[in-house]
Amino acid sequence: MRDIAIRVEGLGKRYRIGQRESYKTLRDSLTDIIQTPLRRLSEWTQPISSSNDQSQVDDGTIWALKDVSLEVERGEVLGIIGRNGAGKTTLLKIFSRITEPTEGCAEIRGRIGSLLEVGTGFHPELTGRENIYLNGAILGMKRSEIDRKFDEIVAFAEIDKFLDTPVKRYSSGMYVRLAFAVAAHLDPEILVVDEVLAVGDAAFQEKCLGRMSGISSEGRTVLFVSHNMDAITRLCTRAIWLDAGRVTEDGSPERVVGKYLAQVRNRYLATPEAVSLVHHPGRRKPFDGVVRLTHCRVISISDNGPGPLSTGGDCRIILGYEADFRLTRNRANFVIVFRNESSVRLASCWSEVTWKGEEELGTNGEIECHIQRIPLLSGHYVLDVGCKVASGWSDFIYEAIALEVGTGRLDSSGQLGVGGWGSWLLDYTWSKSK
């Protein structure tokens, strides 16, 4: 018989856009308490209508999740993927009992440890030591249980020097290290982790992935949301793809990730014509938005003029922008990040590295990055684009466009990137060792 840790049936969550819930008086609340059972009894005697269908949403509301049904077995590592706004975090918040569903139900069997965003469950005025005990108490643990795990948590988080410092003075990296250490070591039967791990450095991310793998090997359940497709395929035993609040695919990580990436390629494949970024679903929030990226295009350059992008060829990546003030080059730092299909970052091009001076950019226009002899083997890649100003990130768009790199020719003697593994074109030769 299957040992089910989580069972979800017909789950839906609807939000009202741009409006806040009105405040209620004590009298209103007491009236609701009295009338709600009577109202529900009346509803139960009526036939079920289809008014909750997503196509019939009232104006001013949106379904973050709609008709989600799934089961997660104990000991399973479930990866949840999808674009920003697909409903991934909302699903985890329902599992963690942070928010209630609008319809359907979620049955959770076991104690949950959640890490949904930096600082969740921490009190900024309390020290790291005090917050460890606070989080343990929230998870329902006894002080003696927390005492046994305390040294292990501190060692994993690597914050022993700042243990008695209020966490409001921690950097985001320190915050997430302590939060993950607490969530993963206080014996949760179900561990829920959102993309927050991206805040940590590469070494700590690997450490966290190892810990999650250890938790699953102990028969406990892990729910893992990430844009890192490589981590999803390495860690998870199963994956689901959420799109517009619904489960689009459910199965092996390799198959689900492959279908997801194929959609990204087809929807945002780079062309010499501009791809609009104005309403791009990959835009990260919240940023200040004083500089906004508006479009992107990629132009391949060869001896014969513009053509398909190929290994060893030159290309120009052009970014459009608009700003709330007149920009100069030294007030904005633009970036283009290359990633492979597994979401592994391969390289980044920052404007401040090679573009000096105070050139006038105005309030809108285009800038370009010229890349000579692009060192990517044939295959598919994605580009993230962003802009920093003095106050920090102003705009960042994840998976802004997709690139298809074809096989190039170095000279008439042969082709580049034929039968190769990996992503990089290296300058190499073979010979007999002397």
Image (spheres, rainbow, N blue to C red):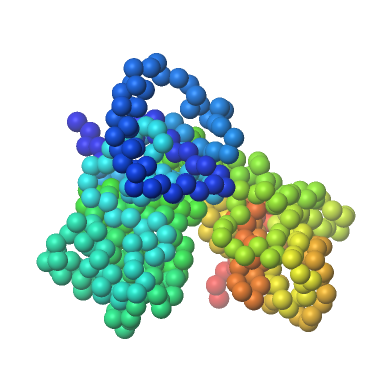
Q: Quadrant of the N terminus?
A: top left
Residue at x 54% of width, y 47% of height: 19
Q: Is residue 181 above or below residue 397?
A: below
Q: Can residue 74 be seen at all in this image of the molecule? A: yes
Q: Farthest residue in the left direction?
A: 144
Task: Left or right? Give the position of 114 relative to 380.
Answer: left
Expressed as whole percent of the image width and height from the top left, the position of residue 179 reads: 34, 65
Residue at x 44% of width, y 31% of height: 67
Expressed as whole percent of the image width and height from the top left, the position of residue 340 reads: 57, 55
Q: Is residue 101 above or below residue 274?
A: above
Q: In front: 136, or 189? A: 136
Task: Left or right? Give the position of 302 relative to 117.
Answer: right
Count of residue discs: 0
Expressed as whole percent of the image width and height from the top left, the position of residue 101 reads: 39, 39
The image quadrant of residue 346 is bottom right
Q: Farthest residue in the right direction?
A: 304
Q: Is residue 195 above or below residue 92?
A: below
Q: In front: 29, or 14? A: 29
The image quadrant of residue 113 is bottom left
Q: Can residue 429 be seen at all in this image of the molecule? A: no
Expressed as whole percent of the image width and height from the top left, the position of residue 415 reads: 71, 54
Q: Quadrant of the C terminus?
A: bottom right
Residue at x 34% of width, y 21% of height: 42
Residue at x 88% of width, y 55% of height: 304
Task: Left or right? Give the position of 108 relative to 194.
Answer: left
